[in-house]
Amino acid sequence: MPEGHTIHRLAQDYTAALARTAVHATSPQGKFTDSAALLDGTVLTTADAHGKHLFLGFGAAGTAPETSSWVHIHLGLFGKVAFGPAPAPPPTDTVRLRLANDTAYADLRGPAACALITDPEKQAIHDRLGPDPLRPDADPEAAYRRISRSRTTVAALLMDQKVVAGVGNVYRAEVLFRHGIDPYRPGKDLTPAEWDAVWQDLTGLMREGVRDNRIDTVRPEHTPEAMGRPPRVDDHGGEVYVYRRANQPCHLCGGPVATAALAARNLFWCPGCQKR
């Protein structure tokens, strides 16, 4: 499932390709036909992201650039967005929503959610999500209040979108490794200083993810060039410390990277560097 940096990058990409122009909206798949008809000819005024949720705001053409309705998108496990230049090719019948103008188009396929919603409905989604490290309105103290009262493992808490929005399996594993935190430590045992360091690190790493459109988490001294090791070969791309490196040697201590199931996801960590 795409992590938060991907969704914020998509918000930027939608804005760059289609914002402030009247769009032609269609649903070749047919599951969004009625809503697409309502959007057709309106202006994409803004794009917003919170965690793994994307919001495209639309307003009436020829009026003040105010948002009157939103398309709420959650990519889930299989959703993808493809951008291209105009003229758009004939769409396939897997496209849930195509937005197009005179210069570009964007095709949304396979999302877990794609719905036309109102301002109150959008706010209700924000209200149930935790702070997002990539949003300027994020309150890390709100997340820590929940973490510090919980006996749940810190690894599970970081994946709980009600606690922290946008962190997925990669950022969860990597940020805990970077700070030497045992993933099985109860949230209540995480100190304020440790949480502050984790939050600041997440913010920096995820901003780099938005910029580069990939996840890289190794420090400069641990890159393949610096260590004289082969670069990582993985469909997910990016240089990492532990994610999907089970049984491979840790870049720091040389011990084997461990893996286990936690909260229905595969957890990766180094027992030597992240001691209990």
Image (tube, rainbow, N blue to C red):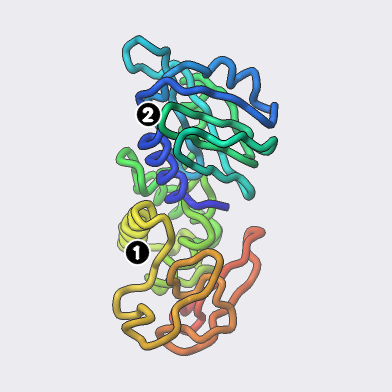
Q: Is residue 65 above or below residue 87?
A: above
Q: Nearer the viewer, residue 168 or 187?
A: 168
Residue sitting at x 55%, y 84%: 248
Q: What kind of element bears circle 1? A: helix
**What amino acid is labelled 1 in the image?**
Glu
Estimate the x, y position of residue 94 in percent, counting from the top left. 68, 38
Q: How many marks?
A: 2
**Residue 81 location in percent, x, y?**
53, 43
**Residue 241 visible in the displayed image:** yes
What is the CA distance from the residue labelled 1 to the residue labelled 2?
A: 40 Å
Residue under numbered circle 2: 19
Q: In the visual, does 105 lie left or right of 264? A: left
List x then y, in percent, for residue 41.
48, 16
**Label for residue 270?**
none
Q: Is residue 199 visible?
A: no
Residue 20 in which image quadrant: top left
What is the crowding at mark 1: few (fewer than 14 residues within 10 Å), some, or many (at least 20)?
few
Residue at horizontal 60%, vertical 20%? 35
- In the figure, 32 relative to 262: above or below? above
Instruction: Place residue 96 in its image quadrant.
Output: top right
Badge 2 amino acid = Ala
Q: What residue is shown with label 1?
A: 194
In depth, the one of 195 and 66 nearer the eye is 66
Residue 101 locus on image (x, y percent): 44, 27
Residue at coordinates 52% horizontally, 43% vertically from top-left? 82
